[in-house]
Image (spheres, rainbow, N blue to C red):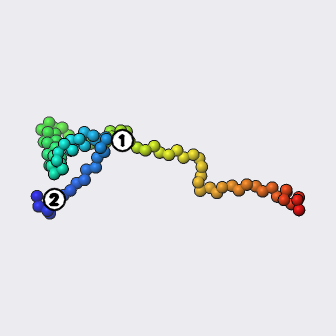
Amino acid sequence: MSDDTAAIYKLPYDKEVDKDIYEWLNSFPKSRKADAVRHALRYYIAASKSSGETFKMITDTSEPARKSSPKPVIKDVDQNKEKKRPKLNLSNITKSQ
């Protein structure tokens, strides 16, 4: 492969949700992981063509399994609202003078 035809594709995955992929990729030496992914994709393409199977994108199956930090509970407090000042009892001040 020449430099002008080379391409890099980043494949993000979650080590917990995609544990099977993580373990499979880590079973190869670092220098052979890209070869393994290319081989697996070609194998899948060939197998799906010979069986007549159409590719179906799986979405949303990993969403519930992903760990997410709980959203903070926000009480009905408008933080932009100015604090009310206490009322002054001016009648006590004027009487003492």
Q: Is residue 16 visible?
A: yes
Q: Are marks 1 and 2 in contact (CB under 8 Å)?
A: no
Dividing the picture into quadrants, the one containing residue 8 is: bottom left
Q: Indicate the position of residue 14 as horizontal and vertical percent values.
A: 31, 45
Is tag 1's residue or tag 2's residue first in the polypeptide sequence? 2
Position of residue 33 relative to residue 95, above or below, is above
> Can I make out residue 45 in this image?
no
Residue depicted at 18% across the width and 38% down the height:
53
Quadrant holding the C terminus: bottom right
Of the residues shown, which amino acid type is indicated by label 1? Answer: Arg
**Residue linked to disc 1:** 66
* Viewer-closest of 39 and 91: 91
Residue displayed at 50% across by 46% down: 72
Q: Secondary structure at mark 1?
A: loop
Give the residue number, with chain letter if any, for mark 2: 6
Q: Position of residue 6 (x, y in %)?
A: 16, 59
Q: Residue at x 17, y 45 (%)?
A: 28
Q: Is residue 90 left or right of residue 75?
A: right
For this view, does 51 lie left or right of residue 60? left
Nearer to us: label 1 or label 2 = 1
Q: Quadrant of residue 45?
A: top left
Residue 9 x %, y %: 22, 54
Between residues 43 and 70, which one lies in front from this camera angle? Answer: 70
Rate crowding at label 1 as few (under 14), some (14 to 19) or many (20 or more) other CA atoms within 10 Å: few
- Determine the secondary structure under disc 2: loop
Q: Which residue is drawn at the image coordinates 88% and 58% (left, top)? A: 95
Disc sitting over residue 26 in the figure: none
Q: Amino acid at mark 2?
A: Ala
Other residues around mark 2 within 10 Å, as few (<14) / some (14–19) / many (≥20)? few
Mark 1 to mark 2 CA distance (whole Å):
33 Å
Please identify the quadrant where the N terminus is shown.
bottom left
Residue 33 spot, x, y in % from top left: 18, 48
